[in-house]
Image (cartoon, rainbow, N blue to C red):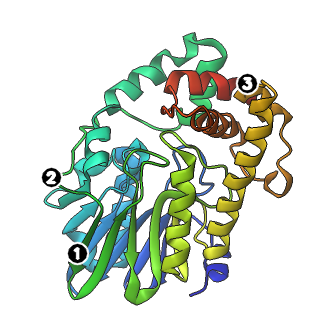
Amino acid sequence: MSGAETMARYEKGLKEVGDGLYAYLQPDGGWGWSNAGLVVEGERTLLIDTLFDLHLTEEMLGAMRRAVPAAARIDTLINTHANGDHCYGNQLVGGARILASERTAAEMAELPPAAMAVMVEQAPSLGEVGQFFLRCFGAFDFNDIELVLPEQTFSGELEIKVGERGLRLIEVGPAHTRGDTLVHVPSAGVLFSGDILFSGSHPVAWAGPVSNWIAACDRILALGPEVVVPGHGPPAGLEAVREQRAYFEYLYDQARVHHAEGLTPLQAARALSLKRWADWGERERLVVNLANIYSELDGQHEPVNPLEAFNQMAELAR
């Protein structure tokens, strides 16, 4: 199945992307509306990521069980990174071995679901930034979620099997987060990218440096999968990876100019022409990406402060 064919079928639900390989898709791929993956070999199963809340995760697991009887039991769960829309549903995959990179496991504990529930509750009293936060996350229910952390971790690369099918776990973070992991199924030409690929929308560099993210795109291109299942947006081919790489390179070029002119990341985001990426969703993330690049240009790279990032994004989203 080609990337073009999968993109033409971007609807909510479970889609086959290879023999025994499935993507669970959540249009429109914006804030919190993430994808997940399922690998099945005989009676053995592996799930790639859970979703942002218990209702959404249970809906996904139900769809998987109806379509693939073996999915009634998930043997292994891989969390590609620490963002809640890829791990807050872990508690519903009882009995599964949960696996993630060491950096991901450490980062997962930093923003528990209860904190998100409090922020949603308090958001109406927080003015413009609170309204923006609700626009991003108000559709999700963060109550009653018990964060279940990985019980097995790795660093670098790890080869595992689902039945007789071999998978490669490749850690490419820090980039989007501190511990981003690719899940490659070489025999099928399919790669589950987590949030290393946002298909059709602006990525957001919470951790960076962005130069690492460009290197991660190069890693995917070198692997040469036919189908890439992104963390958000429709499944795609390598052209989407090339486009995201070109987007980051363009931001670097523009950031160097605006940084030298003394513009702040917010001022640079307002001044910047997005050219062929103008129709990508979540344009407000641009200010976070520029701030990340500015920090790298200053030679003192630090991940963005989340509160400041949301303030800046709310300002840009006006």
Q: Is residue 91 left or right of residue 280?
A: left
Q: Is residue 178 left or right of residue 128?
A: left
In this rendering, the answer to whether 260 lies above or below 307 is below
State whether residue 231 appears in this view.
no
Reading the image, the residue beneath label 1 is 160
Q: Which mark is residue 247?
A: none
In terms of sequence position, does the residue under pointer 1 or pointer 2 come before the other?
2
- Looking at the picture, how far across and down is residue 72, in whole percent? 23, 70
- Looking at the picture, how far across and down is residue 36, in whole percent? 42, 62
Reading the image, the residue beneath label 3 is 264
Q: Amino acid at mark 3?
A: Thr
Q: Nearer the viewer, mark 1 or mark 3?
A: 3
- Looking at the picture, how far across and down is residue 306, in whole percent? 50, 27
User: In the rendered view of the protein, which quadrant contains the C terminus?
Assistant: top right
- Looking at the picture, how far across and down is residue 99, in whole percent? 23, 58
Q: Nearer the viewer, mark 2 or mark 3?
A: 3
Label 1 – label 3 distance at C-alpha? 45 Å
Label 1 – label 2 distance at C-alpha? 15 Å
Q: Residue at x 53, y 50 (%)?
A: 33
In terms of sequence position, does the residue under pointer 1 or pointer 3 come before the other?
1
In terms of sequence position, does the residue under pointer 2 or pointer 3 come before the other?
2
Q: Amino acid at mark 1?
A: Ile
Q: Are marks 1 and 2 in contact (CB under 8 Å)?
A: no
Q: Nearer the viewer, residue 38 or 185?
A: 185
Reading the image, the residue beneath label 2 is 151
